[in-house]
Amino acid sequence: MNSAPAYGLWTLVILNSAIFILFAYSFVKPRTRLDWRSLGAFSAFVVALFTEMYGFPLSIYFLSGWLGERYPNVDFLSHDNGHLWHTLLGFEGNPHLDPLHLLSNLLIVAGFFLLASAWGVLHRAQRHRELATTGWYSRCRHPQYLAFVLIMFGFLLQWPTIPTLLMFPVLVVVYVRLARREEAMALEEFGDRYRRYMEATPRWFPRFNVKQAN
């Protein structure tokens, strides 16, 4: 494993945070207050993540006593050993190739794909003052928030930290509340049409046996 320290790299913190936030922004293109809140919650998570990944390893310092006692021969200040799940679960070899890291990459890519697909449908519907019921919106009611949760969970599998582990359930609650607020607004605007959509379409877990309209 690479034992070179990889912290205090604040340029990497800024660049990586900016890349992922701008990448999400390019898909989301926030227009409403709810759009900005959802992107802001995700941005806070990303900044906290990369701050510990390349800036200052707060979690490793906080756990240093326990980690040093249990793993006396492991230098947790090297970048490779910052992948805590790799060590704690007893994986060997390159941490970037362990099953959790590969799964995390799959979840992050899937999340961004879902985000891009969902927001395109939503914004077309918003422009025409219509319900978003096609594409991923025919499979679940809030694919855009599901996408953010998938991406954040993927990052947790790749690089867990105490702040992001604490933030994750809080942000999930934020997205649940935003989803409920969106539903209340849609009920006011579309009434029975949205009620029928709610009855036919699950809120979070997509159904895949849906025939798409041409």
Image (spheres, grey):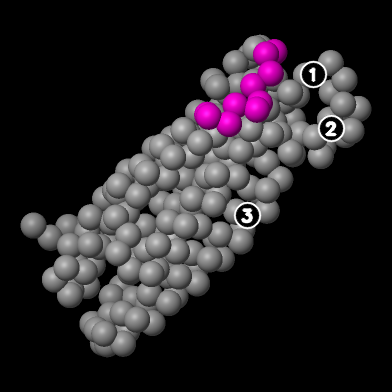
Q: Dot 1 corresponds to which residue? A: 74
- SS at circle 2: helix
Q: Amino acid at mark 3?
A: Met
The answer to which of marks 3 and 2 sits earlier in the sequence is: 2
Q: Is residue 201 visible?
A: yes
The answer to which of marks 2 and 1 sits earlier in the sequence is: 2
Asked whether residue 4 is drawn in magenta, I would say yes
Splitting the image into 4 quarters, where does residue 96 fall?
top right
Neighbours of disc 2 within 10 Å: few (<14), some (14-19), many (20+): some
Q: Is residue 140 shown above or below 88?
A: below
Splitting the image into 4 quarters, where does residue 208 fall?
bottom left
* Residue at 60% from the left image edge and 54% from the top image edge: 168
> Looking at the picture, how far across and down is residue 194, in whole percent?
28, 80
Instruction: Tell me the mark number nearer the camera, choosing from 2 and 1.
Output: 2
Q: Dot 3 corresponds to which residue? A: 167
Res. 213 mark: none
> Looking at the picture, how far across and down is residue 190, in whole percent?
24, 84
Neighbours of disc 1 within 10 Å: few (<14), some (14-19), many (20+): few
Residues drawn in magenta: 3-12
- SS at circle 1: loop
Residue extending furthest toward the left:
214
Q: Dot 2 corresponds to which residue? A: 64
* Residue at 50% from the left image edge and 57% from the top image edge: 41
Q: Amino acid at mark 2?
A: Ser
Q: Amino acid at mark 1?
A: Val
Q: Is residue 95 shown above or below 201?
A: above
